[in-house]
Amino acid sequence: MSPRLRQLVPTAGARILGLGSKQPEQIVTNADIAARGVQTTDEWIRTRVGIVERRLARNDESVVDMAVDAGAKALADAGLGPADIDAVLIATCTMPSHIPNAAAQTADRIGIPGAPAFDINAACAGFCYGLSIGSDMIRAGSARHVLVIGAEKLSDWVDPMDRSTCIIFADGAGAAVLGPVELGERPGIGPVAAGSAGELVDTIVVADRNSFIRQEGQEVYRWAITEIAPVALRALALAGLTPADVDVLVSHQANLRIVESIAKRLWAGGAREDMVVADDIVRSGNTSSASIPLALDHMRAEGRVRSGDLALLVGFGAGLSYASQAVILP
């Protein structure tokens, strides 16, 4: 007779306990980009992507540096210490080398002892993937507290003279600490609606370690404005919600026109007129996997969202990969 394997005790669900973020100090305006010889103007950039300025890291400021700062702030916000964290997940696609991973280095520098730590590369959807994995780890009983970070230094991978990318991409990190819901409480992180469109893999590419990121902007734009809103609606349905339940829409900050298109689809589907829509791209640019947690932390600091608000998160990007879930804000 085979021995009976013991299973870990599952929990009722997970929730977000704290948030944190980090942006580089260097602000690069549209005029700064035009001044270095890129064939563009402030009006051209604002009209097409909605960006006014973005933050770029120093040469000696790394993905891990920003992840450590954001992660430590999220821990403090959650009222927890490094020893309380059972796993560290970092969503990133911009490490200068894939070995060693960012998560193990970040965990060590924060002082998190011996926790499993791994990176997730789902590009701009990575933070939502990380929330899903972290939530599932908590629900299954394999972790009690999970630190999820989206951290990117896209400036390392962008040709500063390529108008299709240099006006968009930026650097930064955002983090969330996840923990279990208490007995009798409702889960604070809903089921994920996720997937991929591998047939469009060539639309956003870094060909090799010596190449810059290239993208077919118009094709990605058409895909996003038609395919992503249904993913968001599916995430609501999986959580037993409707658009009218959404207080805050936080989509990946890819392009202001895409953000507005997703919001319009939700309003057409019954979302309330007072639904707050994240527009962090205007001042932060596109920070890939960091954009959603950055936007959440900034909106909270600005008083645009409140504890207990229901936020609909929607990530999408290279792969092409996408993921969405509803969460209760801490």
Image (cartoon, helix red, strand yellow):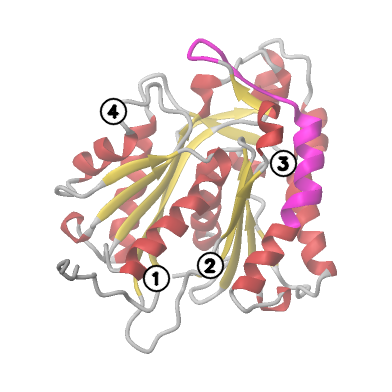
Please tell me in which quadrant of the rendered image residue 103 appears. Answer: top left
Whichever of labels 1 and 2 marks the residue nearer the N terminus, that label is 1
Q: Say which amino acid is labelled 1.
A: Ala
Residue occupied by mark 4: 100
Q: Residue at x 23, y 70 (%)?
A: 7
Q: Is residue 42 magenta?
A: no
Q: Which residues are magenta?
A: 208-229
Residues at discs 1 and 3 in contact (Cβ within 8 Å): no
Residue that badge 2 annotates: 191
Q: What amino acid type should be assigned to the residue bearing mark 2?
A: Pro
Asked whether the beta carbons under mark 3 and mark 2 sit within 8 Å of each other, the answer is no
Sooner in the amino-acid sequence: mark 3 or mark 2: 2
**Residues under numbered marks 1 and 2 in contact, where contact means CB atoms less than 8 Å apart:** no
* 13, 175: nearer the viewer: 13
Report the amino acid beneath label 3.
Answer: Asn
Between disc 4 and disc 1, whose residue precedes? 1
Mark nearer the N terminus (3 vs 4): 4
Mark 3 or mark 1, which is nearer the start of the sequence?
A: 1
View extreme (front): residue: 1
Dot 4: within a 10 Å radius of its alpha carbon, few (fewer than 14), some, or many (20 or more) residues?
few
Q: Which residue is mark 3?
A: 255
Q: Is residue 16 visible?
A: yes
